[in-house]
Amino acid sequence: MPRKPRRPRPEEIALWARAMQGARAMQARPVRDEPPPPDEGPPPPAGEGVAPPPRFPVFRIGEAVREPAIRTALAPSISARLAGAPVRMDRKAFRQLARGKLAPEAKLDLHGMTLAEAQPALLRFVLASHAAGRRLVLVVTGKGRDRDEGGPIPAPRGALRHAVPHWLSQPPLAGVVLQVAEAHRRHGGGGAFYVYLRRRG
């Protein structure tokens, strides 16, 4: 059973009264009536000022990943990125390059190499070509094979083809490389890159 509250004794009442002699009542702050949050309701239909979210391919557990479709939805291709890069070399020479009219002075074939083997080989080749005064060299990567094993993260087709332009844009190669472009079909097309080097200082 709950206990009844006891009444305070007279000495407790007197002690409380002495403690409260200098106290003043606080002014209560007015309570503001805040409006309820607006009801967002259903999302507006497409075409009414809000762009619809991008549609990605449906993926269900246990399915093989449709890598080309997913990669296309997530990022532009290497070819598109290189085609949209600014032209840093002479524009007339670049037009000749794009038409396959300029002959590479040296070629490096990375076919069959792993990424760990290809990176130092590319580094040696480009730096040696620059030291020799060459201006245009060709780096062959191949278009690559589909190696995706159906994991949750799609593996890009042609690991070397994706890695080489990145390596060429990073130090120490970025200091000697002026332009990177996809090769004309007579020099390998999408499976090779033109690397146009800066003049020796």
Image (cartoon, grey):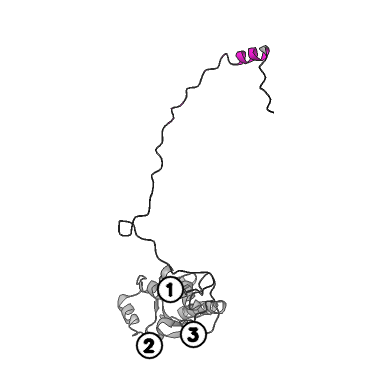
> How far across and down, in percent of the image, does residue 171 sit?
49, 69
Kind of residue at disc 1: Ala
Q: Which residue is mark 3?
A: 109
Q: What is the spatial separation of the Cα atoms under label 3 and label 2, in whole angstroms?
A: 15 Å
Q: Say which label, 3 or 2, has the lower sequence index.
A: 3
Q: Is residue 105 left or right of residue 148?
A: left
Q: Residue 21 versus residue 32: which sits nearer the camera?
A: 32
Circle 1 sits in a helix, a strand or a loop, which is it?
helix
Which quadrant would residue 75 be assigned to in this image? bottom left
Quadrant of the rendered structure where residue 4 is? top right
Among the two numbered marks 2 and 1 on one chain, the one whose residue lies closer to the N terminus: 1
Residue 26 is situated, as x and y percent measured from the top left of the image, at: 50, 22
Residue 137 in sight: no
Dot label at residue 45: none
**Picture residue at 51% right of the left edge, 84% below the top:** 111
Q: The C terminus is located in which quarter?
A: bottom left
Under mark 2, the amino acid is Arg
Q: Amino acid at mark 3?
A: Asp
Q: CA distance from mark 2 to mark 1?
A: 28 Å
**Mark 1 / mark 3, whichever is N-terminal:** 1
The residue sitting at the front extreme is 1
Can see residue 156? Answer: yes
Span shown in magenta = 11-31
